[in-house]
């Protein structure tokens, strides 16, 4: 790849954010602010419930608490800066800050892929081999699986981030996005982008499709197991335990594959912004409600927590 030797080193980037009127920006600001606050509160509530309720110390809820933590971190890596550039003129970000934001966004997203795969395996063991569930899904094993997802995500993202950090950014320094996404950043690299873009495309495709394979494969066995159940009530109960997870998987993977597992194309920046809003703002808000609305144990724990809190406030 040939680069121009006479380059200007970029020390900061300008995030353009949303191309719209001031009134619309104000509406977007308050919409995203309310969404962000609700996302943090709802996911933090799940974490606190799992932490404080002994009957929620089962593997499924440990993975759910890890997912909620990842959702908080994922949206927090994007939303605060997006709110700042939407409502004010603070639309600059340092080169190091841009790389850091991109690193943590894709780190937490990658770990979430692994966590969803682990949750699928948990459902497979619970439905297909329930008699061995307590033996296989021990607490120590679950914690090691969660730790492995974090280490795996870090190892997968570290090398591409270091490679991006060493790319020559020589100007212009304007990113047509509200955060430091890979695609618009690569547009600012000096020289031929084909190898760089294809490398990112292949890495994204391998990550998404491989994790999707390990997420969906357990459900093939789950479906066969459910079909062979003699009781309709048992079939419905087994299906209901997986429905929430499948909804989350469908939304998360659908948006991520459409965004990153495709070759670079022109005139897709508006789609990238919409996709990022769905993956980093809307989905983290929906997940807690998708899981809790279909889970009687979590709803009951939440009611008990509110009763205790109300009693504490009256004292």
Image (tube, grey):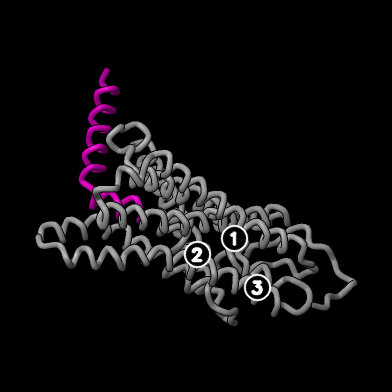
| Quadrant of the rendered image containing residue 142 | top left
Q: Where is residue 274 drawn, in percent x and y?
A: 47, 69
- Neighbourhood count class around disc 1 (C-alpha, 10 Å): few under 14, some 14–19, many 20 upward: many
- Neighbourhood count class around disc 3 (C-alpha, 10 Å): few under 14, some 14–19, many 20 upward: few
Q: Where is residue 19 drawn, in percent x and y?
A: 56, 69
Against 139, residue 202 (above or below) is below
Q: Which label is found at residue 41?
A: none
Principal SS element in the magenta part?
helix
Which residue is found at the position 79% from the left and 77% from the top?
1
Whether residues under marks 2 and 1 lie with C-beta atoms below 8 angstroms apart, the answer is: yes
Q: Which label is found at residue 179?
A: 1
Which residue is found at the position 71% from the left and 63% from the top?
164
- Neighbourhood count class around disc 2 (C-alpha, 10 Å): few under 14, some 14–19, many 20 upward: many
Q: Is residue 301 left or right of residue 198?
A: left
Asked whether 95 falls inside the magenta stretch, the response is no
The residue at which mark 2 appears reads as: 276
Q: Earlier in the sequence, mark 2 or mark 1?
A: 1
Count every numbered label the image shows and give the total.
3
The residue at which mark 3 appears reads as: 199
Q: Is residue 247 visible?
A: yes
């Amino acid at each position: 790849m040939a680069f121009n030797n006479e380059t200007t080193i970029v020390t900061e980037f300008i995030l353009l954010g949303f191309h719209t009127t001031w009134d619309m920006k104000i509406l977007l600001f308050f919409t995203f602010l309310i969404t962000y606050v609700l996302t943090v509160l709802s996911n933090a509530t799940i974490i606190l419930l799992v932490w404080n309720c002994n009957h929620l110390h089962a593997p499924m809820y440990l993975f759910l608490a890890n997912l909620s933590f990842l959702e908080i971190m994922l949206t927090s890596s994007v939303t605060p800066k997006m709110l700042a550039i939407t409502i004010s003129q603070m639309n600059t970000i340092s080169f190091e800050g841009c790389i850091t934001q991109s690193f943590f966004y894709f780190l937490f997203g990658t770990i979430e892929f692994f966590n969803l795969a682990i949750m699928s395996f948990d459902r497979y063991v619970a439905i297909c081999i329930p008699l061995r569930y307590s033996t296989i899904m021990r607490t120590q094993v679950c914690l090691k699986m969660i730790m492995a997802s974090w280490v795996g995500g870090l190892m997968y993202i570290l090398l591409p981030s270091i490679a991006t950090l060493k790319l020559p950014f020589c100007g212009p320094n304007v990113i047509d996005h509200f955060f430091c996404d890979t695609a618009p950043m690569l547009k600012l690299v000096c020289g031929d982008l084909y190898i760089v873009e294809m490398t990112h495309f292949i890495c994204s495709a391998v990550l998404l499709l491989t994790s999707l394979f390990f997420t969906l494969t357990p459900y093939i066995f789950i479906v066969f197991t459910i079909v062979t159940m003699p009781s309709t009530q048992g079939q419905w109960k087994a299906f209901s335990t997986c429905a929430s997870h499948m909804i989350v998987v469908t939304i998360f993977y659908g948006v991520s594959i459409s965004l990153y597992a495709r070759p670079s194309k022109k005139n897709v920046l508006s789609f990238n912004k919409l996709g990022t809003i769905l993956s980093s703002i809307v989905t983290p808000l929906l997940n807690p409600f998708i899981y809790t609305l279909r889970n009687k144990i979590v709803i009951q724990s939440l009611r008990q927590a509110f009763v205790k809190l109300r009693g504490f406030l009256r004292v």
